[in-house]
């Protein structure tokens, strides 16, 4: 609980300001390694895993960029003549937050960048999850109502 009035800390903005993003991760996240050939990536069912995009990581799991959903939807079928060798060639700079940042900071980042989902990274920019606005709001609401954390775990790169 936050200091002050016992009921003050239950107000959702106070909860969001105090709790780290890492506690609110609820969805498993699928990442593409940057060296994955585009021809293999386009055949996977994982492209439909997120309506916002798929994180692209290096061989250590560190965030390289984001393969946007628009890219995955509009890029099919890729021909060998288009020169796209790997998913890294289609990745763009994505919005991310550290798992230790507060939910309040994550909401502020989402608002400034006008996104509904952010990639969550840990030490060394290693992808640990994806935070969607709706999941974060549900988490904050649950904690504000009950004073406890819901019984779900975080995500890790698959």
Image (cartoon, rainbow, N blue to C red):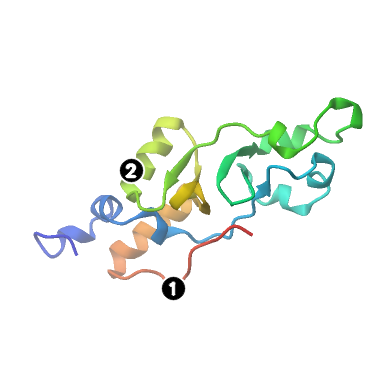
Label 1 sits on residue:
151
70 left or right, relative to 44: left
Q: Residue 114, labelled with which disc?
A: none
**Crowd tier of the residue under label 1, counting other residues whose Cα lies within 10 Å: few below 14, some 14–19, many 20 or above:** few
Quarter of the rendering occupied by the N terminus: bottom left
Q: Is residue 114 above or below residue 46?
A: above
Q: Residue furthest right?
A: 80
Q: Nearer the viewer, residue 11 or 15?
A: 15
Vertical relation: 104 (above or below) 156: above
Mark 2 lies on a secondary structure that is helix
In-front residue for pair 17/84: 84
Q: Residue at x 55, y 47 (%)?
A: 62
Circle 2 Cα neighbour tier, 10 Å, few/some/many (<14 / 14–19 / ≥20) = some
Which residue is farthest left?
A: 4
Q: Position of residue 139 (x, y in %)?
A: 39, 60
Q: Is residue 122 visible?
A: no
Quarter of the figure with residue 36: top right
Query: In the image, which is nearer the foreground, mark 2 or mark 1?
Result: 2
- Mark with earlier residue (2, 1): 2
Residue 128's place in the image compared with 58, above or below, is below
Q: Residue at x 68, y 48 (%)?
A: 32
Is 105 positioned to the left or the right of 115 in the image?
Answer: left
Is residue 84 at least partly visible in the picture? yes
Residue at horizontal 83%, vertical 35%? 76
Quadrant position of residue 2? bottom left
Residue shown at 58% from the left, 60% from the top? 28
- Return the residue found at the far top: 82
- Can you identify the residue that label 2 sits on? 105
Q: Is residue 113 left or right of residue 148?
A: right
Give the image location of residue 43, x and y in percent.
83, 48
Q: CA distance from mark 2 to mark 1?
A: 23 Å
């Amino acid at each position: 609980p936050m200091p002050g009035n016992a009921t003050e800390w239950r107000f959702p903005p106070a909860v969001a300001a105090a709790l780290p993003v890492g506690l609110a991760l609820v969805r498993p996240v699928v990442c593409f390694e940057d060296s994955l050939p585009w021809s293999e990536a386009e055949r996977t069912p994982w492209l439909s895993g997120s309506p916002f995009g798929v994180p692209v990581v290096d061989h250590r799991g560190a965030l390289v960029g984001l393969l946007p959903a628009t890219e995955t939807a509009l890029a099919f079928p890729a021909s060998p003549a288009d020169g796209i060798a790997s998913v890294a060639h289609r990745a763009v700079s994505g919005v991310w937050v550290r798992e230790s940042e507060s939910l309040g900071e994550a909401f502020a980042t989402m608002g400034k960048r006008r996104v509904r989902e952010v990639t969550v990274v840990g030490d060394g920019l290693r992808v640990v999850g994806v935070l969607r606005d709706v999941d974060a709001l549900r988490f904050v609401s649950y904690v504000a109502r009950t004073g406890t954390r819901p019984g779900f775990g975080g995500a890790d790169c698959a």
